Amino acid sequence: LHSPMYFLLSHLAVIDMSYASNNVPKMLANLVNQNRTITFVPCLMQTYLYLAFAHAECLILVVMSYDRFVAICHPLQYSVIMSWRVCTVLAVMSWVFSFLLALVHLVLILRLPFCGPHEINHFFCEILSVLRLACADTGLNQLVIFVACVFVLVGPLCVVLVSYARIVSAVLRIQSGQGRRKAFSTCSSHLCVVGLFFGSAIVVYMAPKSRHPEEQQKVPSLFYSLFNPMLNPLIYTLR
């Protein structure tokens, strides 16, 4: 349990707990109460934390894929490459970058005027739903969201895919069937989590919009903000 893989898993667990704690309590309260209101500052805080934890999960998943790549492709150098110092630096950089990027989104939202209607067509204060309430041009906000998606979703996903292509190539060179099964089982749980999280996030923020974009985005955003944090422990526990 003191290996880098479990050190990174602990960060993923903290992110998932924080992610769910940010959205789910208010969501459940809204389902129970008739008075489904939220004031401006808590709504912005919910948006900020939701973005920060989403970015952090993307980056931690990339670091985890790099850890698996080193473990399988460079096993003799693993303890040197993935030292505790390297793991700590990668984890801290992921957290810091995530909260700074979310702060950029928050500052850009604060400059917008909101003159009504003040009804969010979503389960929580999701950034795109909040921007639809602004009575000013949100072009800069949309541009920053797209650029952030390229750096936090598409870029990391490409790194993960390249890592796993190298892993598959290395595993196929293993002579024993038992060794191949062990290597693939080591990566299968992480690959499931990556597919679920990145797939649903890309559908929300980068897929072409339909005639009813709000309805299109509700289910995938609910999936990665509610179901994904619940599925991650199950996937890794079964592993």
Image (spheres, grey):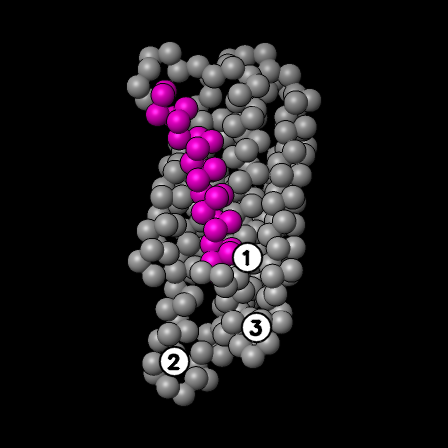
Q: Amino acid at mark 2?
A: Gly
Give the residue pinned by disc 2. 179
Choose between 63 and 139: the one closer to the eye: 63
Q: Is residue 226 above or below residue 66?
A: above
Q: Earlier in the sequence, mark 1 or mark 2?
A: 1
Task: Sort mark 1 into few (<14), some (14-19) or many (20+) by Cα contacts within 10 Å.
Answer: many
Residue appearing at x 69%, y 22% in the figure: 111
Task: Sort mark 2 into few (<14), some (14-19) or many (20+) by Cα contacts within 10 Å.
Answer: few
Q: Amino acid at mark 3?
A: Tyr
Element under disc 2:
helix
Q: Are marks 1 and 2 in contact (CB under 8 Å)?
A: no
Task: Sort mark 3 into few (<14), some (14-19) or many (20+) by Cα contacts within 10 Å.
Answer: some
| Quarter of the picture holding the C terminus | bottom left
Q: Amino acid at mark 1?
A: Val
Task: Pinpoint residue 168: horizontal percent, then vertical percent.
Answer: 46, 74
- Judge depth for marks 2 and 3 and give the one in front: 3
| Quarter of the picture holding the N terminus | bottom left
User: Which numbered circle lies on residue 78?
Assistant: 3
Q: Alpha carbon of mark 1 to alpha carbon of mark 2: how far?
A: 24 Å
Residue 155 relative to residue 175: left or right: right
Q: Alpha carbon of mark 1 to alpha carbon of mark 3: how far?
A: 17 Å
Q: Which residues are magenta?
A: 5-30
Give the residue pinned by disc 1. 62
Residue 24 falls within the magenta-colored stretch: yes
